[in-house]
Amino acid sequence: MSQRKGDGGAYAFTRAAYDEVRDSEIMYAVHFDLRLETGYQKGIWCVRIRAMDLLDNAGGRKMASWEGTWPNSMAQTFEAFLYGAVHRVARMVEEVRNREGYKEATRQK
């Protein structure tokens, strides 16, 4: 993918969002489902993100989810909004996996 002159911020945020998703999917055995939908109010986009567990014993459970709308009261570009949303869900997944590891470690003592 080539980068056009002047869109460095857009590329940096979308690339960082992509990296967050792929790294989390690989590291924590989850699948991210990102949806971009039109909102009920004209000009508003709804972003919905879910992280589904891929481990065999989990049965496809939802590990984390987040949704928000853009534009909103925050003064930010769509790319920054998308990265922030993906980052939140990735940290939620990380926390769930850390807690599961803690439970497993205490069970083995």
Image (spheres, rainbow, N blue to C red):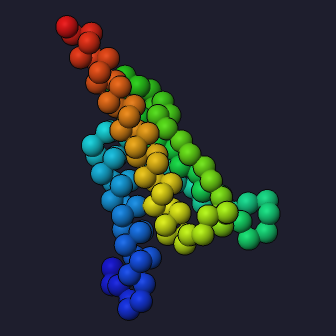
Asked if 78 appears above or below 48 in the picture, the reply is: below
Q: Residue at x 42, y 84 (%)?
A: 7
Q: Position of residue 50 (x, y in %)?
A: 51, 44
Q: Nearer the viewer, residue 5 or 61?
A: 5
**Quadrant in which residue 69 is drawn:** bottom right
Residue 63 at x, y percent in the picture = 47, 34
Q: Is residue 54 above or below residue 14?
A: above
Residue lying furthest right: 41
Q: Quadrant of residue 100?
A: top left
Can the viewer see residue 50 in this picture?
A: yes
Query: Residue 31's x, y, as percent?
Result: 41, 44
Question: As drawn, is 84 to the left or to the right of 76?
Answer: left
Report whether residue 52 is seen. Answer: no
- Tell me which residue sits at (54%, 42%) in the image: 65
| Quarter of the figure with the N terminus | bottom left
Q: Is residue 12 depicted above or below 94 in this figure?
A: below
Q: Nearer the viewer, residue 15 or 87?
A: 87
Residue under the point 27% across and 9% down:
107
